[in-house]
Image (spheres, rainbow, N blue to C red):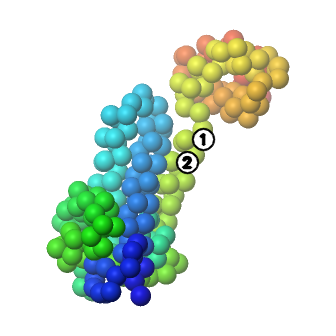
Amino acid sequence: MSDSLFSSDVETADTLHLGRQWLGDLLDVALSLLLGWGLLRALDVNRTPGRLIAVTAGVWCVVCLVGGLSGWTLGQALVGLRLVRGDGTPGVSRGAARVPLALVDLIVSPILQRRVFDRRLGLEAKSVPPWRGGLPWKGAWLVLALAAVWFMVEPTRSETLRYLKTLDGWRCCHGRATPSPSRCENAVSRAVREAAGGDAQAQAVVADCPTATAAMGR
């Protein structure tokens, strides 16, 4: 019995594990978006929709190329699948071909009940338990995903300096109660690090913030 999104009477390489492969691709797209957003925050640049789309597309290209090289992507691994061609990996050229084609398969496979372009590329999904095989590749993707989450949670330099100049930031700097104590603590910590690193703007903000000045003097 196939795990396709809808029932199928014929089991072929492009219909077997159809549902899981669709979910794996969806997770890989989500991973690309997560890494793209995290990268923009890490670079502390203006996060416009166009820039986010461009960076996400770049990350998606890397995901597909690495998937072609190794057969492993984090999304497919999480659903217990590995992409193969015969007994080997898809190869970089087929990974590059999947940059646009996997997105098309993602859209049309629930309707057509088959992976049209993976089939044309001679690719199929092999069921592999998530804890077996490709651990370095899976680990690398997981580390990148966790790093992206960290950058999403951690305030950027510009967010920190902007926050400490607001009314809530003034309360934070003068030891008054704030709506978000954790945000206050993170902002002060980031401002102190930036000031210690020689950032002139951060040093000016810290000089006007008694809490940050005290923290920097410790």
Vertical placement of 169 versus 57: above or below?
above
Q: Residue at x 75, y 21 (%)?
A: 172
Q: Residues within 10 Å of mark 2 (few under 14, many from 20)?
A: some
Query: Is the residue under label 1 in contact with that under label 2 (CB below 8 Å)?
Result: yes
Q: Residue at x 76, y 27 (%)?
A: 179
Where residue 153 is drawn, which disc sits there? 1
Vertical placement of 134 versus 212: above or below?
below
Q: Position of residue 62 (x, y in %)?
A: 31, 56
Q: Is residue 47 left or right of residue 197?
A: left
Between residues 24 and 3, which one lies in front from this camera angle?
3
Secondary structure at numbered mark 2: helix
Quadrant of the rendered structure where residue 72 is?
bottom left
Q: Is residue 205 left or right of residue 92?
A: right
Where is the C terminus found, in terms of image quarters? top right
Tell me which amino acid carries mark 1. Answer: Val
Between residues 114 and 75, which one lies in front from this camera angle?
114
Q: Residues within 10 Å of mark 1 (few under 14, many from 20)?
A: few
Residue 203 in view, yes or no: yes
Q: Is residue 27 left or right of residue 106?
A: right
Vertical placement of 117 versus 34: above or below?
below
Quadrant of the rendered structure where residue 47 is?
top left
Q: In the image as oriented, which residue stretches furthest toward the right?
A: 176
Secondary structure at numbered mark 1: helix
Q: Position of residue 50 (x, y in %)?
A: 33, 34
Q: Position of residue 60 (x, y in %)?
A: 33, 54
Tell me which amino acid carries mark 2. Answer: Val
Q: Which residue is mark 2?
A: 149
Q: Residue at x 53, y 50 (%)?
A: 147
Q: Position of residue 153 (x, y in %)?
A: 60, 41
